[in-house]
Image (tube, helix red, strand yellow):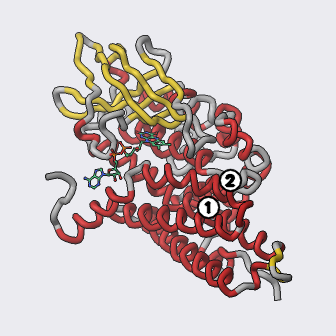
Amino acid sequence: GMAVSPLDLLDLDALLTDEERDVRALTRRVVDDRVRPFVADWYERGEVPVRDLSLEFGKLGLLGMHLTGYGCAGASAVSYGLACLELEAADSGVRSLVSVQGSLAMYAIWKYGSEEQKQRWLPGMAAGELLGCFGLTEPDHGSDPANMATRARRDGDDWVLTGGKMWITNAPVADVAVIWARTSEGVAGFAVPTSAEGFTAREVKRKLSLRASATGEITLDDVRVPESARLPTARGLKAPLSCLTEARFGIVWGALGAARDCLETAIAYAVSREQFGRPIAGFQLTQAKLADMTLELQKGYLLALHLGRRHDAVGLRPEQVSVGKLNNVREAIKIARQCRTILGANGISGEYPVLRHANNLESVLTYEGTSEIHQLVIGQKLTDLSAFAG
Ligand code: FAD
């Protein structure tokens, strides 16, 4: 018989609608044309044509695609998830561009912004003409953003922002930065034009992971913005955390894409590579690896699909998204590393995508809540005891 692709083994496509399959095919096409042929080179050089890509993705409705109005596609959560999967099958950095734009920057403005802010930013962002970033993490405050040091103080009708943000995806190329800052009344969010005086974004260099993604360090040196830049309904830390829940949902799916690409690469390699006079795919140890990895990929996909259907039907609770993010990223990185072994020395070469995916997944494991933080979220739900502090 014919060899079967790992995600086709269980006929899981039967669980998708025609529209969802269309979104997947559309995303696959743009990824094959515009990303796959070039991404290894972008990764190696640590440069990615974010502007060109975002215009391309915008044309297809991939930016803020699960949002409604303001030029957004209004697609289902499952469609959005499938798009993330296909994007990350090319590279986690390219999927990050789309996640940050749609699920973090656009979602924050869409959910918490004024009508004026939505009109000003969202149509251009959906089209990919304007880029956004989302600044929550700081050099000294990552997993514990409640203790952030960035401050916004009132000065007449204005706000003055002081502090710094670190590890901010798209910051070096963004037109608007959603900045979270402490005020005398708790955490508030601001849509800050990156052209504002006192705003600087420096590119983070020498990354060994997520190299096909622009990452920046933002300095806010008395950045003055009017009250109309504050997101009026964002009150307290739960506002940025709700944005993270959206972005984490995309990662639940995206990580599966990186894993699938590794597994497909490893299978193709193992079938054609011969040692001891036969294909290495014919060795039982290789087949055991391939079978076990395929099991995890399928389970992760079913989990993603369940969360996607719940998202579309009733919405998701944060701990439910934690289950998906923790499991799927942790299993994806295991799959990537295991596939690497199947490729032998070629596994460490940039001629193959496998170690690039594995290295990228190190970032994915850490951002949007580390694995440990998701364990604590789930643990707290199970025990009603918080293990975060003290
Ligand atoms: P820390 O919080 O210092 O954690 C270090 C270690 O301690 C981890 O293993 C962690 O799990 C563990 N730890 C911390 N607290 C506890 C605890 N209570 N119990 C047990 N273990 C604990 N942030 C943004 O705001 N916007 C972005 O666009 C963005 N993009 C990113 C892109 C990349 C490539 C990377 C690498 C990061 C990005 N981040 C972004 C930042 C990311 O969200 C943080 O790195 C992450 O939240 C972890 O924070 P930290 O790095 O400060 O690690």
Q: Is residue 373 left or right of residue 340?
A: left
Q: Give the residue displayed 51% in from the left and 59% down from the top.
A: 77
Indicate left or right for 366 with 141 as reference. right
Give the percent coordinates (x, y) of residue 37: 79, 48
From the viewer's side, name the closer residue of 63 and 144: 144
Is residue 331 something one can see in this rendering? Answer: yes
Q: Earlier in the sequence, mark 1 or mark 2?
A: 2
**Residue 69 in sight:** no
Q: Amino acid at mark 1?
A: Gly
Mark 1 sits on what residue?
257
Q: Residues within 10 Å of mark 1 (few under 14, many from 20)?
A: many
Identify the residue at horizontal 66%, vertical 31% (top origin). 51
Classify mark 2: residues with Cα within 10 Å, few (<14), some (14-19) or many (20+).
many
Q: Is residue 367 above or below residue 312?
A: above
**Label drawn at residue 346:** none
Residue at position x 80%, y 76% from top? Answer: 271
Which residue is the site of mark 2? Answer: 90
Question: In the image, what residue type sits under mark 2?
Answer: Ala
Helix, strand or loop status at disc 2: helix
SS assignment at label 1: helix
Front residue of 369 and 194: 369
